[in-house]
Image: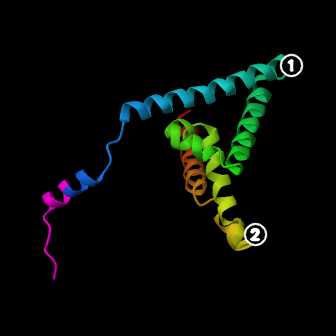
Amino acid sequence: MGKEMTKEQYSNMVKKASPDSPIIKNCIHAFIVGGIICCIGQFIMNWCSVFGMSTEESTTCTSVILVVTASLLTGLGLYSKLGKFAGAGSVVPITGFSNSVTAPAIEFKKEGFIMGLGAKIFIVAGPVILYGVLTSIVVGIIYYFVS
């Protein structure tokens, strides 16, 4: 048998092998890209209201445009490059959700429409949708009984 390693030795080995993470730089990238995505969304919303759309219609239009754009960028392989640069700045906005649905759809399409695309399209977004719906139900029930 090989030589057994202590927890301390293993920790030291992991520290040596792990690259240093430039946390400040990553946070700045995330802040800038996330802010740019939000500014683009605000610009679209203002642009829609110029054409006489109500606030509700403008927000819906903005969401649709951002989701479609992110899906298109994912399909072209550009959103993953943005994600590597921006980290959470590209994942947190609605564009990140669009990417999390589109990327598995593209990846598993080759396995067929039923067992690939149909079965695995929500592999990442599924838990988000599930727990979002369940949380909204619980909050709705609480709100109903409190008010």
**Which quadrant: the N terminus?**
bottom left
Q: Is residue 106 above or below residue 100?
A: below
At 60% from the left edge and 26% from the top edge, which residue is drawn?
36
Residue 121 seen in render: no
Q: Is residue 121 above or below residue 29?
A: below
* The magenta segment: 1-12
**Type of residue at label 2?**
Phe
**Type of residue at label 1?**
Gly
At 55% from the left edge and 39% from the top edge, which residue is drawn?
92
Q: CA distance from mark 1 to mark 2?
A: 41 Å
Which mark identifies residue 52? 1
Of helix, strand and loop, which one carries label 2?
Answer: helix
Q: Quadrant of residue 46?
A: top right
Mark 2, residues whose alpha carbon is within 10 Å: few (<14), some, or many (≥20)? some
What percent of the width, then of the height, locates residue 141? 57, 44
| Mark 1 and mark 2 residues within 8 Å of each other at the beta carbon | no
24 or 49, which lies in front?
Answer: 24
Mark 1, residues whose alpha carbon is within 10 Å: few (<14), some, or many (≥20)? few
38 or 140, which lies in front?
Answer: 38
Q: Is residue 54 above or below residue 98?
A: above
Which mark identifies residue 113? 2
Q: How many marks?
A: 2
At 76% from the left edge and 33% from the top edge, which residue is drawn?
60
What percent of the width, then of the height, locates residue 38? 62, 27
At 71% from the left edge and 51% from the top edge, which residue is drawn?
75
